[in-house]
């Protein structure tokens, strides 16, 4: 039997509820995503997918290796050799098995031009170079926004639309690929990561649509109430605490519009798959590398372990005709259009895709094949990005910030938006102790300097030496492809 094609689609900084089908189910405002909704209707949506290190580079190494960042230690290797240089990667194994392997879009590899097993990689800089050769001058980021800022702007005509360029290169690959081999294509969109710069057409779609409001908790009623360790990424990356609700509405409008632009390109991509009779033998996986706080609890961006930053969308669609909405989709009793509520992570993408190709995962991979029932039942999730740590089990999530030693505890079953801190609740004392023991054991194995929940001082947010602001100005080539 011929091996199937594999299409991995990722976005950057898209939180789990920034998807039409999810927002509708939760009764929240969300973006217009009819094509991703179709993907969920004809596939399986995994409702509890989390990232252990909510930063671009580490999450992409997790996808490539099937290992969480506390094993890869990508955050310690930003200027050195990443784990992908010494471990079997997803594209390397597929290339060896005869697949035509192509990566298009933002990879965020170190060094930037490394392939790590892909036969061919096309980065955003390559797309801009092609535009200039074709006589279409590009002016970098003509709006002048940094790539961590939450203040939006409408994309100018002389600023590149990398969402469109990425999607069109993916379509071109489908039309020009080697048809004697199955393909693995990673279509990597750099949005809705800031700058929040949608085009005028997508922006206008949301002129009269509900945009929702950020959530606050009993521990985050105002900026000063939030423990300073948890405030640090926002203060460092964009100072978004300065935004009032009217400005946050503009940010949400731009964020939703960027996601709609991606969805429109995916509509073209899915149509091309159907027109070339590829849907019937192509697995499609959609995910994001991490989320975005988007004003929840007065916070922006990522790095922290709250739901907005670590909870991401994940959809897996098995091969099948475009209009088949029912039937078995994976190896267990989940129908097309179904929701799988198991805890999973981006480390599970590698073994799932390899299994779809009829290949075994390497021994270095610790992820699980999502096409099989979870042998462990409800898995324990560990979030690990110093100074932010989290452990989630049995419907509870405990946060611990090593910068100040602050602990927060939430019952996700009753309080999924983390609004009621139960850390000091006597009725939750046994649960807190059990989760702290889990986290302490993890730290002893993977971060011995933090063993025993050893904390350092809380950051002084008024000290410029502590809060070294970096709104993400990038106009020239950086050590990695930071264009979004």
Image: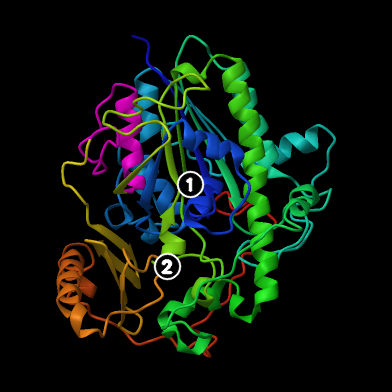
Whole-percent x, y for residue 405 in the image: 30, 83
Label 1 belongs to which residue? Answer: 109
User: Where residue 224 appears, x then y in whole percent?
Assistant: 50, 89
Considering depth in this image, is 400 or 480 the residue closer to the camera? Answer: 400
Residue 378 vertical placement versus 400 (above, below): above
In the image: residue 195, left or right of residue 66: right
The residue at 68%/60% (across/down) is 253
Q: How far from the left and from the top, in percent, is residue 314?
A: 43, 44
> Which circle marks residue 417 in the picture?
2
In the rendered picture of this protein, how many numbered marks are placed on residues?
Answer: 2
Residue 146 appearing in the image: no
**Residue at image location 25% in from the left, 40% down from the top:** 368
- The magenta-colored residue range is 344-372
x, y (%) of residue 372?
A: 24, 33
Please report whichever mark, 1 or 2, sits nearer to the chain's N-terminal start.
1
- Badge 1, how many Cα within 10 Å: few under 14, some, many 20+? many
Q: Identify the image quadrant of residue 203.
A: bottom right
Residue at the (59%, 79%) spot, across then down: 241
Residue located 41% across and 59% down the image = 310
Whether 155 is drawn above or below 439: the answer is: above
Image depth: mark 1 or mark 2 in front: 2
Residue 366: in sight, yes or no? yes
Q: CA distance from mark 1 to mark 2?
A: 33 Å
Provide the secondary structure element on which disc 1 rests: loop
Up the image or down, 317 lies above or below 75; here it is: above
């Amino acid at each position: 039997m011929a091996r199937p094609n594999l299409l991995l689609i990722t976005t950057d900084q898209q939180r789990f509820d920034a998807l039409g089908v999810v927002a509708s189910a939760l009764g929240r405002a969300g973006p217009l995503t009819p094509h991703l909704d179709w993907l969920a209707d004809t596939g399986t949506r995994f409702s509890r997918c989390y990232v252990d290190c909510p930063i671009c580079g580490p999450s992409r190494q997790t996808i490539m290796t099937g290992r969480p960042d506390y094993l890869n230690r990508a955050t310690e290797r930003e200027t050195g050799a990443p784990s992908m240089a010494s471990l079997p990667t997803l594209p390397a194994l597929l290339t060896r098995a005869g697949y035509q392997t192509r990566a298009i879009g933002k990879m965020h590899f170190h060094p930037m031009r490394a392939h790590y097993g892909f036969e061919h990689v096309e980065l955003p800089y390559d797309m801009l170079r092609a535009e200039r050769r074709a006589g279409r001058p590009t002016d970098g980021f003509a709006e002048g926004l940094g790539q961590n800022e939450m203040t939006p702007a409408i994309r100018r005509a002389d600023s590149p639309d990398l969402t469109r360029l990425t999607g069109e290169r993916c379509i071109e690959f489908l039309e020009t690929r080697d048809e004697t081999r199955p393909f693995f294509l990673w279509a990597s969109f750099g949005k809705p990561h800031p700058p929040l710069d949608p085009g005028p057409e997508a922006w206008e779609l949301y002129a009269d649509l509900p945009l929702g409001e950020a959530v606050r908790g009993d521990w985050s009623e105002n900026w000063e109430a939030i423990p300073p360790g948890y405030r640090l990424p926002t203060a460092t990356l964009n100072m978004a605490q300065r935004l009032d609700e009217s400005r946050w509405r503009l940010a949400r409008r731009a964020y939703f519009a960027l996601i709609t632009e991606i969805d429109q390109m995916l509509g073209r991509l899915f149509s091309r798959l159907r027109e070339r009779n590829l849907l019937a033998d192509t697995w499609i996986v959609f995910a994001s590398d991490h989320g975005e706080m988007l004003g929840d609890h007065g916070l922006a961006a990522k790095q922290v372990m709250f739901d907005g930053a670590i909870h991401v969308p994940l959809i897996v669609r098995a091969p099948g005709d475009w209009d088949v909405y029912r039937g078995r989709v994976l190896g267990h009793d989940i129908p097309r259009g179904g929701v799988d509520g198991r805890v999973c992570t981006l480390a599970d993408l590698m073994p799932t895709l390899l299994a779809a190709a009829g290949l075994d995962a390497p021994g270095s991979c610790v992820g699980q094949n999502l096409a099989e029932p979870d042998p462990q039942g409800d898995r324990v999730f560990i979030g690990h990005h110093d100074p932010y740590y989290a452990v989630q089990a049995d419907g509870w999530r405990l946060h611990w910030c090593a910068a100040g030693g602050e602990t927060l505890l939430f019952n996700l079953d009753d309080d999924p938006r983390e609004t009621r801190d139960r850390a000091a609740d006597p009725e939750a004392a046994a649960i807190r102790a059990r989760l702290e023991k889990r986290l302490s054991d993890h730290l002893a194995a993977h971060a011995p300097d933090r063993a025993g929940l050893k904390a350092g001082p809380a950051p002084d947010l008024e000290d410029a030496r502590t809060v070294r602001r970096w709104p993400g100005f990038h106009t020239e080539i950086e050590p990695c492809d930071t264009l979004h």
